[in-house]
Image: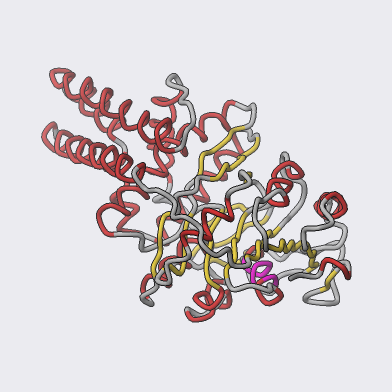
Amino acid sequence: MTWVLFCLTAGALVYTLLSIIAAWRYRSVVPPKLLSPEPISILKPLSGLDDLLESNLRTFFLQDYPNFEILFAVREAHDPAVTVVEKLRNEFPNVPARLFVTGDPPYANAKVFSLDRMLKEAANDLVVMSDSDVRVTPDLLRVVAGEFQDATVGVATCPYRAVPGESFWSRLESTGMNTDFIAGILVARMLEGMKFAVGPTIVARRHVLQAIGGFDRFKDYLAEDFVIGKFAAEAGYGVILSSYVIEHHIGNSNLSQNAAHRLRWVRSTRRSRPAGYLGQLFTMPLPLALTLVAWNHAWWPVLAVTVCLRALAAYVISVQVLKVSINWLLLPVEDCVNFFFWLAGFFGNTIEWRGRRYELFRDGRFALLSPHSSTEKSGRHLAETGVGGRQGK
């Protein structure tokens, strides 16, 4: 048993070294110079008042870019996000912005339904699909437009730094996001290139999305971001990890909310990538080293080496790549909590998402378990509430 644990820990240490190398290689990426700005459509699915929603959305209106439009979608006309959007449209009359009421989705993934409706109305081929809890600087569009000057690029994933709320569980989760999540992406990028897309902001060509089946192909997947990149790569289109790092404001959460979110993530990951999920064990060096030393105290030097390498990897990824500080006291706690939820991910096939319960299937698809009755049904699948002078480019 000692040697089994040692081999597992050694494998995790090799992965940790690879993550450090991958992070340094990513730091050398320089955004290409933008030669000819092409028009861009930003797609924003909304649902309710997320923390700091107005501040987050305002950063997209403030883009330093000559030709872009913003499309918003809500499910119901009385969604409180509508008021925020209307306020920003009035504040920035020179930014073409449209708001759509989609009605209830006919399938499980409401976000995909909103994106599909907005894409049909978007004026441009290059689209930025971004969640409501994302905040950016004014140069986002300039950077991604420069990257898409390469005609082989079809999809790009924007890495992100997690910005927590005030709660302990939010700060704990952000620690893991900023030290672990991006590490796996960087290692995959270095070893085999980007074969998937993840995260709250994805950039893509409309014609690429259409060529791989459109959103109708993604509608039954929980991790639609992952399969967008996967299907694009399989079809021969270039998928890249963008050089632009966004801010992902994860808000506050209590223990039950945080647990539900983590279980949703690990269960959907296991269903989407079963072999990769099993391999995630090698991304957890500290829990493995602690288990080894607990089993055989004489192997304590392995734990010392693990702590040093883990700290170095966390520093390089968080501070050097994501430009965010680390809470060193929370880091070992998060590593152990993450290991616990990884184990929990092997059990159960249901998730909670925005107050609804879904069943996960083996191929990564999911379905609503209990029907939802909306207080207001939309008689139209797409009702536009735009204002004439700001209908697009």
| Image quadrant containing the N terminus | top left
The magenta span reads 112-118
| Residue at figure coordinates x 59%, y 67% from the top left | 38
Residue 253, image quadrant? top right
Q: Position of residue 167 (x, y in %)?
A: 62, 27
What count of labels does the image hold? 0
Q: Does 375 appear above or below 60?
A: below
Q: Would residue 282 appear left or right of 145 to someone viewing this image?
A: left
Q: Nearer the viewer, residue 15 or 236?
A: 236
Image position of 70 with respect to 337: above or below:
below
Image point 55% across, 40% down: which residue? 259
State which quarter of the image contains the C terminus: bottom right
Q: Answer yes or no: is residue 71 visible.
A: yes
Residue 60 among magenta residues: no
User: What predominant SS class does the magenta segment belong to?
Assistant: helix
Position of residue 284 measured from the top left corner of the image (x, y, whole percent)? 31, 37
- The answer to whether residue 113 is magenta is yes
Residue at the image point whose x is 64% and y is 63% from the top: 111
Q: Indicate left or right for 59 with 289 as reference.
A: right
Single out the residue that lies furthest toward the left.
Answer: 3
* x 72%, y 61%: residue: 70
Looking at the image, can residue 362 be seen?
A: no
| Vertical comparison of 265 with 319: above or below | below
